[in-house]
Amino acid sequence: MFFLREGVRRRQIRVTRLLPSFLLSGLEEMENAGFRSESFDSLHHPSEDDDDEMVDIAGATLDFSATEDDPPLGSGPNEEPGSSSGAAGMNGGGKPLDPLEETLPGLGTYEDFNTIDWVREKSKDRERHREITNKSKLSTMALLHSVSDAFSGWLLMLLVGLMSGALAGGIDIAAHWLTDMKEGICLVGFWFNHEHCCWTSNETTFQERDRCPQWQSWAELITGTAEGPFAYIVNYMMYIFWALLFAFLAVALVRAFAPYACGSGIPEIKTILSGFIIRGYLGKWTLLIKVITLVLAVSSGLSLGKEGPLVHVACCCANILCHLFTKYRKNEAKRREVLSAAAAVGVSVAFGAPIGGVLFSLEEVSYYFPLKTLWRSFFAALVAAFTLRSINPFGNSRLVLFYVEFHAPWHLVELGPFILLGIFGGLWGALFIRANIAWCRRRKTTRLGHYPVTEVLVVAAITAIIAFPNSYTRMSGAELIAELFNDCSLLDSSQLCGYKQLNNTQTAVGNCLADRPAGVGLYTALWQLALALIFKIVITVITFGMKVPSGLFIPSMAVGAIAGRLLGVGMEQLAYYNHDWFIFKGWCSPGADCITPGLYAMVGAAACLGGVTRMTVSLVVIMFELTGGLEYIVPLMAATMTSKWVADALGREGIYEAHIRLNGYPFLEAKEEFEHSSLAVDVMRPRRSDPALAVLTQESMTVGEVETLVESTHYSGFPVVVSQESQRLVGFVLRRDLLISIDNARKRQEGVVSASQVLFTEHAPAQDPDGPPPLRLRGILDLSPFTVTDHTPMDITVDIFRKLGLRQCLVTHNGRLLGIITKKDILKHMAHIANRDPDSILFN
């Protein structure tokens, strides 16, 4: 039962206590073309004319008429539209149908691309909880049911953590294997990657630790030799072949089976968590295809990462598992609490950072994050990290490939270079967002967007052709970051550790080496890194947003890590050759390990990722969990804060907010200030030149008149007034609930015809004994709709929408209804103030 008289009447009084820190909901715009059909049946059976209605969302072409993975809330898997516990009593006697007394299938549910009513959902859950608590005092079974209901949230978190951790481990293992397959194959078992293949070999050397007889490159397998120009060409061609094959399979599977599986998923997750409904985006098919194509896309060598899409994968797991628990299956607000925790799980398994994951969900994606969700997020992230650690996908007992440990302390003088890295990260972030949005807009508005497979193959081919000659672009993003974070030790044979060996000055403390002059190998590595930096900056702009799963964390961190390593080596050489400078005196003596280039790489990675996403606290904690050292928090904080300041000075939006606006999602950003001095009367509809507001009267309209009004308009809700003359507000009724109730009454209540009177009053007036029975619809009427006066400042109105999660708000003057303000009206008004196109808000 979706509305209880007492709960609905007291909603306005209780709402401030119910949602004290409530953040914004998504939206329910009154103009909703999806509700133009006349009956409830037509809501679920689109006409043939609607089959071709398509929209481009998140870079994917979607069909509105496609069947969804998730059934509408409020109906169980076996419920039919005509079934009801009270159906037998509805067929005889001509008893007026009151939806308040009968549970109508579909009542209170939501259509695709609409927004939930946060206040109603929270009220429903509170009434349900109150009912369970009262019953628990009556019997032992009811008490057990109460206990199981309270424990179900923790059980769900356990399942989400286990499932997400297992999937993340499988993705890591498969991606590592397929990435190595581009270069060769293991003779003792094709399912082994390069590292695992050579683990048991006794024929590896210190200089060539990756060479073993069990692993053969494609040139060795085809031509019998690993050296020479012909072998190089064979390896080159095979690298390009596998890259194109993996990229083609990824885009073909996404296009054919799950268009929602493309992209990062975080912009859509943010929009869904704000209350917007995108059915199928977190469904079973999306999860399956996302997992498979994520492995293929990462393995193809494209400049993308798997960390962002892992948030989407974890949210898919949570949404699917929610259907096992009635409390979460039938309440969209409760389900979004679980999805907020799942976002934390995604980051936890992506970086091996459970605490950082919780803070990421709180800071970046969640809109409603109560304390209970914080605890459950922490528990789920812990379970997911433990599961991933048990799988041990990298074979090093770590949760990520680029876990590092630094030993040398940093000095106050180094804050200058760290801040420079922050400035670079902010500049890169702002530049990347502008360039990527411009490219994605071009993709949407030109013929380029009509050929997603061709675009992916062309970009994959360009990436493979340019990347293969440079060892730093040929390796995967995670391996590159691990290489750049690495602190050179006695056992390193990397080119980045190609220093000159000076036995007379070289000292070693533990496994750390003193600063040394750069050798030929290091200079070669620096030139390759400089070229790799330019390549990564350009190719990432084009790659992010294509029709394959694509994360942005790893490419952004790679750009920053390269820049940081270059600056770190420069500082190291400056300190080595200029010990007597005043900035180095007293802390950097000859033979000491003064500068750690790997630390600069880590700080640069954090700065660039912060500049792109505008993360701050969660980013610092994630990087801290990666290094395991408390002493590097200050450099990370300085660089991250600087990058945010610089990026904010050049553009207020992060990459996810920019993509939300590009896709036209109805998302009211909590961080955006409303500084205009307009009033509610300036934004409400109808405007002076518009037709009068379509309203229902509480007792003077017939079923036929109501159906005519609904059919002739495309609004998704109607205010109910006392009469057309007085315009005194009574309540608000949703179009969907109205259609469902009338349709059910026609089918199940005897005598309801077009001439039947529709009553929204509590007591029915005197009826003609020879006339048809009335249709009582007070049960679906919201008796306490949120209202503001016509002179309410819009900054206050916007705050009300944000903090209470409203879908619409009615405007009155001395109790008389004047108009209505919806989420879309506010977004259009804000776009108009910012000199943006108001029609860019696509969805209702």
Image (tube, helix red, strand yellow):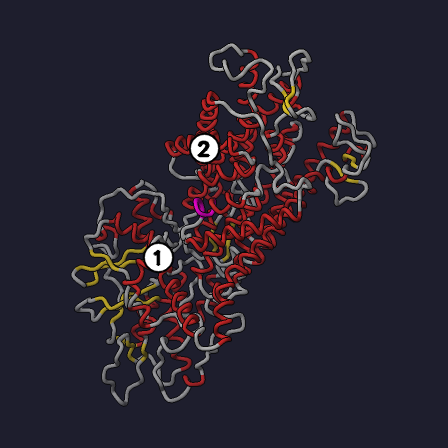
Point out residue 230 in the picture as x, y percentages from the top left corner.
77, 27
Point out residue 503 in the picture as x, y percentages from the top left corner.
69, 13
Q: Is residue 166 positioned above or below 753 on the image?
A: above
Point out residue 310 in the picture as x, y percentages from the top left corner.
56, 47
Q: Residue at x 37, y 52 (%)?
A: 23
Query: What residue would you read off at disc 1?
Result: 19
The answer to whether the residue labelled 1 contacts the one labelled 2, judged by CB atoms less than 8 Å apart, is no
Query: What is the span of residues highlighted in magenta in the rendered image?
Result: 360-365
Prevailing secondary structure class for the magenta stretch in the rendered image: helix
Instruction: Locate residue 798 relative to residue 426 in the image: left or right.
Output: left
Q: Residue at x 51, y 67 (%)?
A: 148
Q: Amino acid at mark 2?
A: Met
Q: Amino acid at mark 1?
A: Leu
Query: What residue would you read off at disc 2?
Result: 637
Instruction: Locate residue 208 relative to residue 474 in the image: left or right.
Output: right
Q: Residue at x 64, y 48 (%)?
A: 169
Instruction: Locate residue 820 relative to residue 475 in the image: left or right.
Output: left
